[in-house]
Amino acid sequence: MPAQDPLDFLAIDHVEFYVSNARQASHFYRSTLGLVPRAYAGLETGVRDFASWVLERGHVRFVLTSPLSPDVRTDISEHIARHGDGVKDIALRVRDAKAAHAEAVRRGAISVREPETLSDSHGKVVRASIATYGDTIHTFIEREDYAGPFLPGYRAVENPPSAPETGIAAIDHIVGNVGLGDMNKWVAFYRDVLGFSQLTHFNDNQIATDYTALMSKVMQNGSGRIKFPINEPAESKRRSQIEEYLIHYGGPGVQHIALATKDIVATVDTLKSAGIHFLRVPHTYYEDLPERIGPIHEDYEELAKRGILVDKDDEGYLLQIFSQPMQDRPTLFYEVIRRHGCKGFGVGNFKSLFEAIEREQAARGNL
């Protein structure tokens, strides 16, 4: 019987953000995305240099972490100073963190945290980390022998405050932006180091407007549960959305996180009522949509009212919508997606979407 691949990833365990105020950020994500506070670490739990809030909904787990010491420069404070609020860690669940780390390093990964075992009365967790694009990392998490709320050092949030039922159920994919000419380098990293395969490729002819363009390749793990599109800017007449991101983020990083729902109309209504602002495409986008896409379960008029986009492939169709940036810097944003069999990423919507983004860039003076 062949040996188990140590880099056979089970799922995205969590996404950790470094933010300037984790308590306030947790309130924002609870009241808008409906994520429920489940665990906390900080001064009250014996942690002296950072505070973290863990929020969950379905299979989505976000960790919001802030520095506590004003006089000591830490990785957390330096990350925030350079990037603003942003994603630091896309943590991946594995069966054996030590073996996964050793194999990734053997294949060429740069280690940023050697394997360590954390334990408390709930059991133990083993974790280790490697670098990926920019200042982003992947932590390998082994938690089969742990029954606590998140990690040792965290305590459960008793009687968490209510959160709206948004319908968000899982992370569909996470998109990274890298510099001009670096996309293939990181495609090779995910292929050769982490064992991912390329799902699809979009070139600058497919992802372009009259003014800006980008290129993208989608990498996925063996099970197809984890998908990481990687974008780079392409030569264009004006500053592309990827270039705008790289300038304001201070380098490569996570551009957006796509959140899956089973009822996108209800989810969008709830998020809008909570204060999330979405990009809008011109109403003309919907004029020939029924003829282009064909019959779907949803009502086209209801989709048009909300600005929800539709695309299809040979296996079905998808519905998607994109938020405006979630912080003052025009960096991280969210996608809400509902798949009906379709395995694509909405290539038929790219031109309309990017024109909508360009209108936002023009309003910011960054086009």
Image: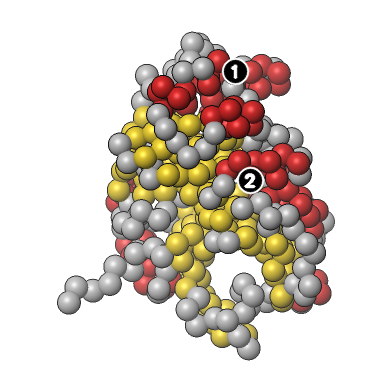
Instruction: Using a 10 Å C-alpha cutoff, classify the residue at mark 2 as few (fewer than 14 neighbours), some (14 to 19) or many (20 or more).
Output: many
Q: Secondary structure at mark 1?
A: loop
In the shown orientation, is residue 52 left or right of residue 233? right
Q: Which residue is mark 2?
A: 267
Work out whether residue 289 can be spotted: yes
Q: Quadrant of residue 50?
A: bottom right
Report the disc number at residue 282.
Answer: 1
> Which residue ends up furthest to the bottom in the rendered image?
121
Q: Residue at x 47, y 23 (%)?
A: 289
> Which circle's residue, 2 or 1, is located before the other in the chain?
2
The image shows residue 174 at horizontal and vertical percentages of: 50, 46
Q: Residue at x 34, y 64 (%)?
A: 8
Instruction: Using a 10 Å C-alpha cutoff, classify the residue at mark 1 as few (fewer than 14 neighbours), some (14 to 19) or many (20 or more).
Output: few
In the shown orientation, is residue 2 left or right of residue 31? left
The image shows residue 206 at horizontal and vertical percentages of: 38, 22
Quadrant, the N terminus? bottom left
The image shows residue 362 at horizontal and vertical percentages of: 66, 16
Q: Residue at x 62, y 72 (%)?
A: 150
Q: How many marks?
A: 2
Identified by mark 1, the residue type is Pro
Identified by mark 2, the residue type is Thr
